[in-house]
Amino acid sequence: MQRIFSGIQPSGIPHLGNYLGAVRNWAALQRDHECIYCVVDLHAITTWQDPRLLAKQTRELAASLIACGIDPLAHILFNQSAVHAHVRLAWICNCVARMGWLNRMTQFKDKAGKDRENVSTGLFVYPNLMAADILTYHATRVPVGDDQRQHLELANDIAQKFNHDYGNFFPAIEPLIMGPAARVMSLRDGTKKMSKSDASEQSSINLTDDADTIALKIRRAKTDPQPLPGDVAGLEGRPEARNLVGIFAALTDTDHAAVLRDHGGQGFGAFKEALTALLVEKLTPIASETRRLLDDPATLDTLLRQGAHRAAAIAEPIVSEAERMVGFLKL
Ligand code: TYM
């Protein structure tokens, strides 16, 4: 059975993009893979997080993942800082990766913007930690949204250079970028990705939104004046229409073409109503299950602690071997 690893940051409420681009696929992959899923608190602090909120958000995210169908007993769910092997291997990755490789990372350029001199050095080396997360478990398949593609290419480059410099040890990583909503866009601007850090609350549907909030956000979602086209070619140059159709397709387990066969020619008023009904049907049970799990933080903490122990048991021999290969004295 192939081993899966993936992670998500506890820096804000998970949104529909996280769900459709990643977490829903994580849940499905549990059927025929050994899965390790991680709430990446080390990654979160690459931009400042209020310490009073970080622990709370880590728990909330863990609850939300379980509510989305992640099974913390049959598989592994834990918070990243609890397994020290990640940072040990991340240091080795820092020393293997080249400045030029990291300078090409578009997500760093987007996040740092004009403030490059003032962002944390952690934000710059963040993809090295992400590579370490995966390599720590010899995971071979990584389900992510489309925005993480470049980071996974870098992880493969790091693995290859380690293998070249120290001897063959790390397997190749296969990105799993799946479904019609691998890149969910902002509801306010179809050319911008839906993101936790977007200033406008109207730009994303959060997994904690209630039915009224979902209805309002979809009603206000940007569209264009034309009715929906009858085929996929008609979505060309219409990013907002493409986005809403993609969301509908993902929620109904179909594709853009199937949605347009059923809804082509419809105005956005009617289509938005259908989309709202679908979102409410799929998301409100997740929100209520999340609340239920958060009512019992002791049980949640126990699940995470046990997850971290089981993760560490896999990670420790792999990272120790990498350290030995580098030449560290292992006493
Ligand atoms: P993060 O926390 O930004 O996002 C978690 C997952 O959600 C996906 N995603 C999206 N998918 C579709 N449309 C969107 N608008 C959208 N926004 C986010 C992301 O692609 C991701 O799969 N660096 C990672 C976390 C990470 C990780 C790892 C992932 C740390 N270590 C090792 C895989 C393997 C991140 O910041 O994801």
Image (spheres, rainbow, N blue to C red):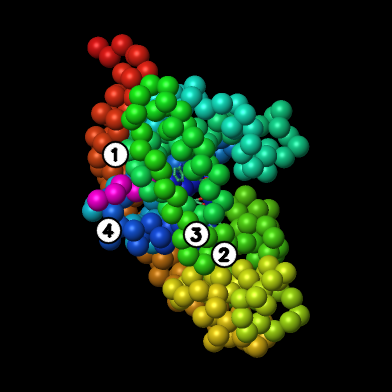
Q: Which residue is mark 3?
A: 21
Picture quarter with the C terminus: top left
Is label 2 in a helix, a strand or a loop?
loop
Q: Which residue is mark 2?
A: 205
Which is nearer the N-term, disc 2 or disc 4?
Answer: 4
**273 relative to 299, above or below:** below
In-image side of 77 versus 206 (left or right): left
Which is nearer the N-term, disc 1 or disc 3?
Answer: 3
Q: How many marks?
A: 4
Q: Is mark 3 within 8 Å of ligand 1?
A: yes
Is label 4 in a helix, a strand or a loop?
loop
Which is nearer the N-term, disc 1 or disc 4?
Answer: 4
Q: Nearer the viewer, mark 1 or mark 4?
A: 4
Report the Cα–Cα distance between label 2 and label 4.
30 Å
Report the Cα–Cα distance between label 4 and label 3.
19 Å
Report the Cα–Cα distance between label 1 and label 2.
31 Å
Q: Which residue is mark 1?
A: 311
Report the Cα–Cα distance between label 1 and label 4.
19 Å
**Residue 260 vs residue 174, the one in the foreground:** 174
Q: Position of residue 251 (x, y in %)?
A: 47, 72
Which is nearer the N-term, disc 3 or disc 2?
Answer: 3
The overriding secondary structure of the stretch rendered in magenta is strand
Q: Residues within 10 Å of mark 3 (few under 14, many from 20)?
A: many
Q: Which residue is mark 4?
A: 32
Which is nearer the N-term, disc 1 or disc 2?
Answer: 2
Is label 1 in a helix, a strand or a loop?
helix
Q: Amino acid at mark 3?
A: Gly
Report the Cα–Cα distance between label 1 and label 3.
24 Å
Is label 3 in a helix, a strand or a loop?
helix
Q: Amino acid at mark 1?
A: Ala
**Residue 98 vs residue 137, the one in the foreground:** 98
